[in-house]
Amino acid sequence: MNNNLSAAAAAQKRFKKTGFLHHRTFLQEMVRRWPFYLMILPGMLYIVIFNYLPMFGAVIAFKDYNPVKGIWGSKWIGFKNFEFFFKSDAAWRVTFNTIFYNLLIIVLVTVISVLFAILLQETGSRMRTAVYKSVMLMPFFLSWIVGEYIVYALLNTDQGLVNGIRKSLGLEAIDWYSDAIYWRFIMPLAYLLKQVGYTSVIYVAAVTGISSDYYEAAEIDGASKWQKARFITIPLLMPVVIILMLLWLGKIFNGGLGDWGAFYNLPRESGILFSSTDVIDTYVFRSLRTVNDIGMSSAVGLYQAVVGLVLVLISNYLVKKYDSDSSLF
Amino acid sequence: MLHRSKYIPSVIAYILILALTLVGCGTSSDSGNTPSTSENQNQTKTTQETAKPNDPPVELTFYIANAPVKDMDRIMDAANKIIKEKINATLKLVVTDWSAYPQKMNLMISSGEPFDLAFTGSWGELNYFQNASKGAYLDITDLLDKYAPVTKSRVPESIWQGVKVNGKIYGSINYQVWGMAGAKGVQLRKDFADKYNFDWKSIKNWNDLTPFLDAVKKGEPGIIPWEYSNQADNFADMPLIYGMDSVGDNKIPGWIRINDKDVKVFNQYETEEYKDYLKTFRNWYVNGYIKKDAATMKDYLPDRKAKRIAALYANPYPDLVDMPELGVQSFMSQAPPEDKVYSYSKRFTEPFIPANSPSTAIVAVGANSKHPEKAVQLIELLNTDDSLFHLLAFGEEGKDYKKISDKQIEMIKDMYNFNWSEWEIGQSYGRMLWDQNANVELSEKMLSMIYEADKTAAVSPVMGFVFNSEPVKTQIANVDATLKEYLYTLDSGSVDPDKYYTEFLNKLKKAGADDIIAEKQKQIDEWKKANGK
Amino acid sequence: MGQLKMKREGLFSKLAINLMFIVYCAMCLIPVLLVLSISLTNEKSLLTDGYHLIPKEFSLIGYQYVFSGTTSILNAYKITMIVTAVGSFLHLLVTSLMSYAISRNEVRYRNQVSFLVFFTILFNGGLAPYYILITKYLHLKDTLLVLIIVLLVSPVHVLIMRNFFKALPDSIIESARIDGSGEFNTFFRIVLPLSTPVLATIGLFISIAYWNDWFTSALFIENNKLYTLQYLLQALMSNIQYLLSNEQASRAIEKSIGMLPGESARMAACVLSIGPIILMYPVLQRYFVKGLTLGAVKA
């Protein structure tokens, strides 16, 4: 086994300068590890057909897209489609909001979910754990459109439940929909409530996947619950935490791991709130309402993807330096 | 041996998945799974062989927006008997949910997928004009004259101008039951107007309403004096009230005055009319005539249904001055009928045909249609064959609806129901079937008045002009984003115009409003020259 | 003494933990209860009294409307269940095979493959080329298969699952190999049974995704016998909106069934669509436990 590997490595070294070596070792690798590559094949085939083939459509970003002429028949126009976004004075504001909310939500969701995943093991009853987990997951099933109704039911000025409570306590009703500052808190809160259940479920799976041997050994050594969490659970959860954060980072400019539906629906498109609720996707959606131009929307999509890619490549490089096992690739 | 047999289940499982991931590619060569292509081949053949009487009928696809309809198959079978007999074709009506329809049609056009007929229009994302000028629809100017002469002749020539692109017609107008000519005005609750002795007959503009709203505010707790809704903005969505008409999209800067012979384009947000409007509405808001969260009201229905509204914007033509007998059936919009909340309606303007109203509902023939002649024949049939139209609109008599008088029907619960979407496919002129709530005599009198107005009403000076937004789409995108941010809060009176109006105008200018206006002017001048105006 | 103190501390922290979860769960339940309550409230009461956590005037009309208003909802349930079951199974199979292979260190191109997978999360060609691929080249329009195939592989799931496989002790796989077990055999007989927690989790997510997918139906399905539940409910909701704004339509409906249930029917549709999947969750939960015990026995 080991012999084989070192032989291959030696061969690689020897032929490093010859051009056709790469091809040969590729074939060798395929032959030697054929069962693994066979396992990859169906998924890879799917990704090539359904993800990579349509990707050529991204050239629309550089074209004056005419649906009748098709993607290839349309005229090339360079970077003209990018202009509307970068020339607008809102570009900075929405970029800031996008980063602000993403970072805030990434950190909060991760910390709370990991905490919940660990504490869910400590409720003292498997039954209770199961109930909590199911209930926590429930908001995840509600779409943001339904969410809009719920938030409106809670916050509308005249008949909202929150203002009802405030009135019964002798406090003045608050006009939630016309003061942007509240939404700096409402948006992350709504997002958390929907997302934490889902992310916790992933971490719970990771925690239950940890072999009980570790804990037994620690118990023999007299480790406390806190110590077990600190020295066993959290380190073993780290790879999953890192992978989820990397994935999220990649989409930071493009909806995050969740979706921007919240930012579109919950504030009910109230113009007064835009200073704190407008993110790149909602801004683009709004600007293209009448123009309805595929070229311009894919230009912004492409920009978001490129920034995401750069972010991930940098962070992946850093992760790899410290813990190569946890890196994305 | 033993060792090898362990492999078998996993190998089988593997082959299974591989097969399944590949099925997609496999079907491309298997024509059995692709009825559309094989049928299209059949169809091409039949047209080439010049229709013999016993030719197999061609299938025409017709895409419309509608929710899935119960018992659709039964009604389509019955409808196809008629269609087959009349024009030797069958209709395949494809319904797609409203929330996905525009996107689906745009994708079908992008991919060059053939369709024979499709509902379209110039609002929302339906993009009739853009698609027509890019060649997604067939030019049916001549086909209409040849195969749909009745449909063509029923719509006044001036209104056909409104769907032309470069002088060619790309869709048949569904000349609506409600007509094209409209007037803008208001609807008030009768009980309040009577109680406070309000002289509703003489109101001509927003300011005339103020005493009424004030009386309601003071005397009727729990009632909202004026409904402001961003679904129909009281300035940006109703240029007619200010004697103007829009060029292209309502809200984008660049309107014209309807009595301006020179057709000069200007920024409507810079006019004196707009400044006056802002003053009035800010005053209304501060005095509590408008709901506190009016700017974000997406859904006005709950308030209307709860009878909380005292006055609102309406399209009353004819109004209660034109036709006082309408009073017996004039209820407040959306108020529960059993409560009988009577209303007065009064128009501020003369009937007028704006440039974008003819293109409200259009049936277009696909550019890739294999049977354009048959498709246009079907348009004619849907607009002239009343039994066919009624069948699609209401179902079968006795099964889906009961006739309660000569021209009136009652729908039977839980049976076929086209969701009142028949206006997407055409119109029956001869014996319109009214539902049980309508007063047939009054409704028909009202309709004849509207049809009369369609021939005599003033027509927008830019009727027939189509604005090509391509050269300034960057500016439009940025202006659009700015509009959404400021317009509703300003127009509902929620913010002080002294503070925000200048900021709004500056942002519009920065976003490129002037470029858009200049481009509109340029294109209109060219159009005027080309058409000898 | 020390023993007792520790026990009391344990009891106290347990109490605190449970209390925290109860508070959080209550926060999660409010929106769900609100939806349920609105769906069970008389429409008129919603208009005059606003929304409440307990219906002021109980009514089932929202549900009645959903069941009577559209084409066969039962057939749609059937289609959705077939698509969800077959789709989730295949998704798990393809995903786990692929992610297992790229989790193994002896596979040299694992990082390149991972990158290719990851890249598709960031970049896509948009809807138009995808639509063209499905309809023009693969001819999948109006087939049951298209409903399954659109979600067959999710790059995010591949990468998450890969990390779980990475955490498996290498020794188990090595020793299986020494025993002469082939790679596929090892995967199906040893790795998968050890991975039930992650399979159940990903299985849950993908079945939710299949269950909730209405857009595929809207774009590619024209045959009314292939409509999925979510598409019908979505169509029903936008139809209510359309009918409500059409004065003539809503009057005619009011004459026959009373006030058109707008909010309540919308929320009833929401309850009907998420109800089954919430009920399904405990079943998957049982897999968790089963996987746990199985894992314990093996380990």
Image (tube, coloured by chain):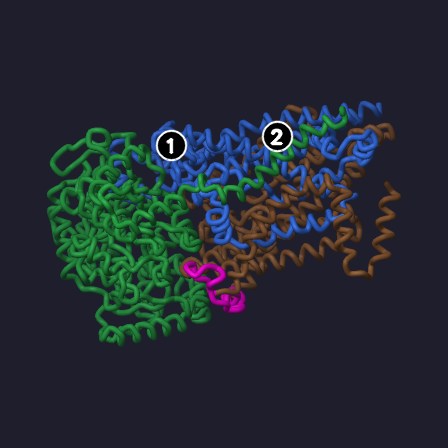
Q: Do the residues labelled 2 and 1 touch (CB within 8 Å)?
A: no
Residue plotted at (84% across, 49% down): A8
Q: Give the chain of mark 1.
A: C
- Residue C110 marker: none
| For residue B477, side relative to residue A38 (left or right) | left
Does the magenta portion include A70?
yes
Residue plotted at (16% across, 56% down): B153
- Residue C66 marker: 1
Please state which of residues A293 and A13 is positioned toward the viewer in this rendering.
A13
Residue plotted at (50% across, 42% down): B27
Please state which of residues B348 and B33 is positioned toward the viewer in this rendering.
B33
Give how far apart the Cα atoms at labels 2 and 1 are: 31 Å
Q: Where does label 2 land, which residue? A: A132
Please state which of residues A326 and A89 is positioned toward the viewer in this rendering.
A326
Q: Quadrant of residue A113?
A: top right
Where residue B104 appears, x then y in whole percent?
41, 49
Where residue B515 appears, x then y in whole percent?
41, 73
Q: Chain B is drawn in which colour?
A: green
Q: In which quarter of the image is the N terminus of chain B?
A: top right
Q: In which quarter of the image is the C terminus of chain B?
A: bottom left
Magenta span of residues? A64-88
Residue type at the position of mark 2 = Tyr
Where residue C173 appears, x then y in whole percent?
79, 34
Q: Chain C is drawn in which colour?
A: blue
Q: Give the chain of mark 2.
A: A
Where residue A164 appears, x then y in whole percent?
45, 39
| For residue B451, side relative to residue C153 (left or right) | left
In the image, the chain rendered in brown is A
